[in-house]
Image: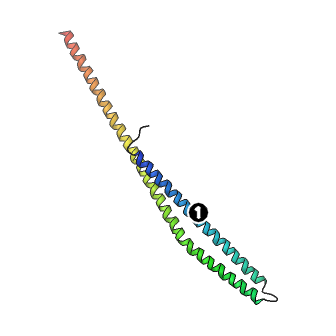
Amino acid sequence: MSLTRFDTIIRLRRHERDRCAVNLANAVHAVEKVELEIRVTEEEKLGLQELARSQRFGVVSLERLRSHNRYEVQLQARLNGLLQQKEPLVENRIRSRKQLDEAEIELKRFKKIEQLDRERVGNDQLRRDRKAMDELAMTRFWHQCYSQKETTT
C-alpha cells in the first residue's frame, strides 16, 4: 500500500490518542489507589469506634481512652488529607478523559478525510482512464473511417 499524505498525520493522531489513553489509565489508577486508602482508613476508624464502644462498660482507663481519641483524630486527619488529595486526581481524570475523547474525534476525522480523499483520487483516476479510453476509441474510429475512405476511392 502506498503512503498517502494523511498517513503521517494519522500516525501522529494515533500516537496522541495512545498517549492520552495512558494518561487516563494513570489517572484512574491514582484515583483508585486513593479511594482504596480512604476505604481502609474508614474501616480502621470504624473498627476503632467499635472497640471503644465495646470497652465502655466496666473499668475505664483514662490513658486508653485518650489513646483511642488521639488515634481517631489521626485517622480523621489522614482521611481528610486523602479526600483533599482525591479532588485534584478526580479533576485530572476528567481532564484526561476529555483529552482522550478529543484525540479519538481528531483521529476519526482525519481517517474520514483520508477515505474521502482516496475516493476522490479514485474517481479522478477513473475519469482519466475513461477519457483515455474514449480518445483511443475515437482515434480507432477515425482510423477505420479514413482507411475505409481510402479503400473506396
Left or right? Give the position of 2 relative to 142.
right
Q: Quadrant of residue 102?
A: bottom left
Q: Which image quadrant is residue 58 in?
A: bottom right
Quadrant hosting residue 139:
top left
Viewer-closest of 25 and 107 = 25
Disc 1 on helix, strand or loop?
helix
Tell which of 133 and 45 is nearer to you. Answer: 45
Colouring convention used in this rendered image of the protein: rainbow
Rendered residue at 48%/54% (across/down): 17
According to the picture, the residue beneath numbered tag 1 turns out to be: 29
Q: Position of residue 8 (x, y in %)?
A: 41, 47
104 in relation to 2, above or below: below
Q: Quadrant of the N terminus?
A: top left
Dot 1 amino acid type: His
Please determine whether, in this image, residue 135 is positioned above or below residue 14. above
Residue 70 placement (x, y as % from top left): 68, 84
Q: How many marks?
A: 1
Residue 98 in picture, x, y percent from top left: 47, 62
Residue 93's x, y, as percent? 52, 65
Q: Is residue 70 left or right of residue 146?
A: right
From what the image shows, is residue 132 above or below residue 120? above
Residue at (51, 68) in percent of width and height: 91
Q: Which of the image's four quarters has the C terminus?
A: top left
Residue drawn at (72%, 79%) of the image: 48
Q: Is residue 70 left or right of residue 142?
A: right
User: Please, which residue is most extreme toward the right here?
Assistant: 58
Please name the residue shown 41% across and 44% down the image. Answer: 115
How many other residues sit within 10 Å of disc 1, few (<14), some (14-19) or many (≥20)?
A: some
Viewed as shown, does residue 21 lie left or right of 2? right
